[in-house]
Amino acid sequence: MSNIQVKKVSGEEQFKNVISHAKEYGFIFQSSEIYDGLSAVYDYGQMGAELKKNIRDYWWKSMVQLHENIVGIDAAIFMHPTTWKASGHVDAFNDPLIDNKDSKKRYRADVLIEEYVAKIEVKIQKEVEKAKARFENFDETMFRSTNPRVMENQKKIDEINTRFKTALNDNNLEEVKQIILDLEIVCPISGTRNWTDVRQFNLMFSTQLGSVTDDSNTIYLRPETAQGIFVNFLNVQKTGRMKIPFGIAQTGKAFRNEIVARQFIFRMREFEQMEMQFFVKPGTEMEWYEQWKTKRINWHRSLGFPEGKYRFHDHLKLAHYANAACDIEFEFPFGFKELEGIHSRTDFDLKNHMEFSGKKMQYFDPEDNENYIPYVVETSIGLDRMFLAVMSMALNEEVLEDGSSRVVMNIPAFLAPYKVAVLPLMKKDGLPEKAREILNRLKLDHNCLYEEKDAIGKRYRRMDAIGVPYCITVDHQTLEDNTVTIRDRDTMQQVRVHIDQLPAMVNEKVSMSAQLGKLM
Ligand code: GAP
């Protein structure tokens, strides 16, 4: 392993590599590509569907299987339209948009400001890195609070954030535009500051139920899976005899008419969420909020990516339902961005559903002998974003000892789309038959590939490129003594083992259960 060097590439280059690799090896295709695609909609190919399923399973098992007090449901995408009135989405699920009159391009006003702030943050980070390289025993906190350039830039950031937060909280769109003008933010296409006013734009897609097209039949494609959980809160609590605190988990599609839809699968119009609503006694929500922050960051860390890739970010503007909220941000190739949200949603949703439906949404607490509407702590992660995080970390180009290079996907083995490839060294002498015998033994437990075309070296490279953690090669010696070589994707080391050892050996190396054990 020590003789393998990972090639360093810029974030921009890495992002391009991820996009082209995803297409070339059947992970992700543009939706309806033969018709030139549909903006911000993607299809998962044969490799992508498996990887996505494994990430979803890992989340589901860690939430539902490992917690006695969390159960999972699968609610419909279509919901009664009043759901979205009650949830606040009809009135408040908006993004502030702004157009550049010269380029005719549309932007999210908040994103323009956040990107401006992020550029100042990059400047600060560069100063920090420079100083770190110069001084031994470097104290970053001290440096940040004494270096005049850093302090000045930090002051600028704080001022912008305070002004921006006030404007958003007051729903003062004129002030949001004024901030953009004062910061002299230009349109990246036209280079001008010829902006329209900022307007609110509702992100929900609507359609008609049944054959009559009038407003009363308008229904929405759900913009979050959470509401399917809230409206079923009592159904689950009663039929499952759940006692507070307890959680309901769900994975499924959500839809948002995003204004700025770019960055590949980071921001899509149709995407998948993995959400869990945890119902707690009012007054205990902040305690649970902290607990879920810890649990979720530990889940991310369990994947083994570097610590520095994650950070928490407290929300500047709280969503209409929250009394505390933060994001777990991940350093994607294009910078730190939201991967998961953790929100203390109070009793906002249940209370409103109770009001709009006229049905009780209360819980009788047998311990305290009282009725109350529970408070909710939510964890919500985008499956597609998690997929992008895994792919961005896994895809590497390496220079090998002999100077040659290989492209490899170091996907954590328990998440890999295919766990094993069985490769007969030659297409003759009974080797394919022996290989298929081994394949048939392993495929009951694992997704396995069989490949006999091309020279063995070329086949190894292809398996590396799709992230297969183990290649089993069947050669003439196998026919004599039932041994094979098993090659490790990451180290490229090969060992010879008896075929009877294979099931247990592969199991140990790729098992999701062992991985789940780390979370307990
Ligand atoms: N129920 C709460 C909720 O929906 P959110 O912060 O709007 O909160 C939760 O979304 C997660 O869903 C985000 O952290 C992100 O990972 C994912 N997500 C949101 N919008 C997305 C989009 N347009 N494309 C892909 N993922 C998205």
Image: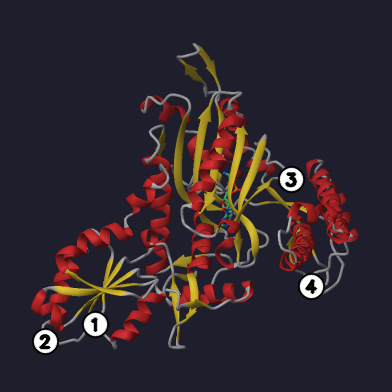
Circles 2 and 3: CB atoms closer than 8 Å: no
Q: Estimate the spatial distance between the alpha carbons at disc 2 and disc 3, rounded to whole Å.
A: 68 Å
Mark 3 CB within 8 Å of ligand 1? no
- Which-is-in-front pick, marks 4 and 1? 1
Crowd rating for badge 2 (residues with CA inside 10 Å; few <14, some 14–19, many 20+): few
Quadrant position of the N terminus in the picture: bottom left
**Residue at the spot 55% in from the left edge and 23% down from the top edge:** 281
Note whether 474 is above or below 160 in the view shown.
below
- Asked whether residue 177 appears in the rendered view, the answer is no
Circle 4 is placed at which residue position? 103
Quarter of the C terminus within the rendering: top left
| Element marked by disc 2 | loop
Of the residues tagged 3 and 4, which is closer to the observer?
3
Q: Are marks 3 and 1 in contact (CB under 8 Å)?
A: no
The local crowd at label 1, few if under 14, some if 14 to 19, many if 20 or more residues have their Cα within 10 Å, is some
Which residue was labeled with disc 2?
A: 429
Q: Which mark is residue 316?
A: 3
